[in-house]
Amino acid sequence: MMTTNKNLPDNNGFFGDFGGRFLPDELSKIMAELKNEFEEAKNSDDFREEFKTYLKDYVGRPSLFYYAEKLTKELGGAKVYLKREDLNHTGSHKINNVIGQALLAKRLGKKRIIAETGAGQHGVATATACALFDMECIVYMGEEDVRRQALNVFRMELLGAKVVAVKDGTRTLKDAVDAALTDLMGSYKDTFYMLGSAVGPDPYPQMVKYFQSVIGEEIKEQCMQAEGRLPDYLVACVGGGSNAIGMFAPFYEDKDVKLVGVEPAGRGLDTPDHAASITKGTKGIIHGFKCFVLQDDKGEPLPVYSIAAGLDYPGVGPEHCFYAESGRAEYGSVTDKQAVDAFLYLSKTEGIIPAIESSHAVSYGCQLARNLPKDKIVVINLSGRGDKDVHEIAHVLKEYM
Ligand SMILES: *Cc1c(COP(=O)(O)O)cnc(C)c1O
């Protein structure tokens, strides 16, 4: 496996002005060790082979590259393909990353796994990998999220994980990350921290990118096979940015392929209720790395909002910040209302119920395709399936009517 932008990040974990490691010395040392171990694993044929085998036999890869013919006809513009990460075991792209990190933990002889989770998606994926690899699993989750996401808490427990309710701060995702880092400081000798997106201190953004790059690598092959050429546009939703960077990075050097990230505009970019960190944020530091952050005058992260819990984070992966600043990728945004409309539209036209996160990419990708000539190719990353969102959508529709 390889990505084509070999110079990113630099030796200090920077993507241009973004990323790095802004941590107390003790944690910084732990990250430096992790980085060495990751480098060794990446260069090991056995490790790469084992990762590939689990992706094939357990996750069910390669995921489909599906020509949405009916959708394409209705839109009347560019040809639309969907990359079906929703068909992976556990229903999203998150499993790619946790399998990779679990294999790394196994290689390091670490049997105790900790993770943070917001809505519970990454927590469930982590608990799944821990069940498979027979590892102890502790998931930190804000008390408020534990209450809101009772079903995912039960799922994690079914899979053998222990869920710890975090009672600090706003009792949400940010506090769960802090609790996990605190645990790691005292426990790193036998503990591995599984981070759920392409964020956090170096080496996490490059590590998560490495494990998710299978998405873009498969698209390259599948599009060559189906169309005899590379796509014109790649579209993905951006929360922390892992499904998007996994899709984009393998195309970095293919400058004719346009990369489009879609952020959550929530109730509107002119309201405080969104989580569009690249579009509306300013440079700052959050959770040990530099990126565009939605922050107040004192540098404290603002409370952010999106209908999609998986996109609801005040920071964003450093590599996306670099792509945005250098112009390699473009970042747009989609409101809750537009995402819900896309959720309904894809369900009806193709018989595919997308995750509400992915619906952001579907909305933007469809608008794009509609206005392009018929000989163009747009690929939308369907990062997850929407079964988890059906309840919330039913509730929202009642409000609309
Ligand atoms: C978590 C999640 C996301 C957002 O995370 P990224 O790291 O930005 O990919 C998007 N889609 C689904 C289905 C998710 O579960």
Image (tube, rainbow, N blue to C red):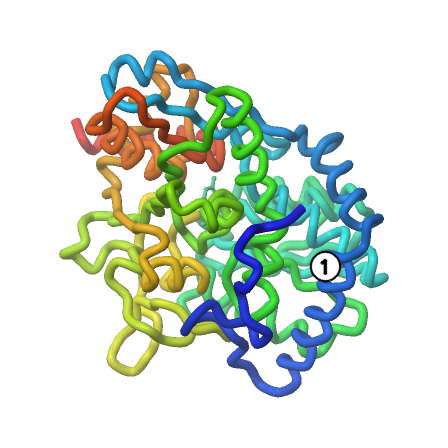
In the shown orientation, is residue 93 left or right of residue 267? right
Is 313 left or right of 193, judged from the image as shown? left
Image quarter for residue 114? bottom right
Instruction: Note whether residue 149 is visible.
Output: no
Q: Position of residue 322 (x, y in %)?
A: 39, 63
The residue at 41%/60% (across/down) is 316
Residue 236 at least partly seen: yes
Residue 36 image-quadrant placement: bottom right
Q: Residue at x 25, y 43 (%)?
A: 334
Quick check: is the Cβ at mark 1 less than 8 Å away from ligand 1?
no
Considering the image in quadrants, where does the C terminus appear?
Answer: top left
Name the residue located 55 percent from the left edge and 39 percent from the top edge: 215
Amino acid type shown at disc 1:
Ile
The one nearer the camera, 255 or 134, is 255
Question: Residue 94 at what x, y percent from top left?
Answer: 57, 44
All told, the count of numbered labels is 1
Q: Establish if 280 lies above or below 22.
A: above
Residue 355 picture location, percent across and down: 43, 34
Residue 150 in the image: state x and y as whole percent: 52, 44
Q: Residue at x 31, y 60 (%)?
A: 278
Say if 181 sits above or below 54 in the image: below
As drawn, 123 above or below 299: above
- Residue at the far bottom: name it: 25
Q: Is residue 371 above or below residue 32?
A: above
| Residue receiving disc 1 | 113
Q: Nearer the viewer, residue 304 or 22?
A: 22
Q: Decide: few, some or many residues near mark 1? Use Cα within 10 Å; few <14, some 14-19, many ≥20.
A: many
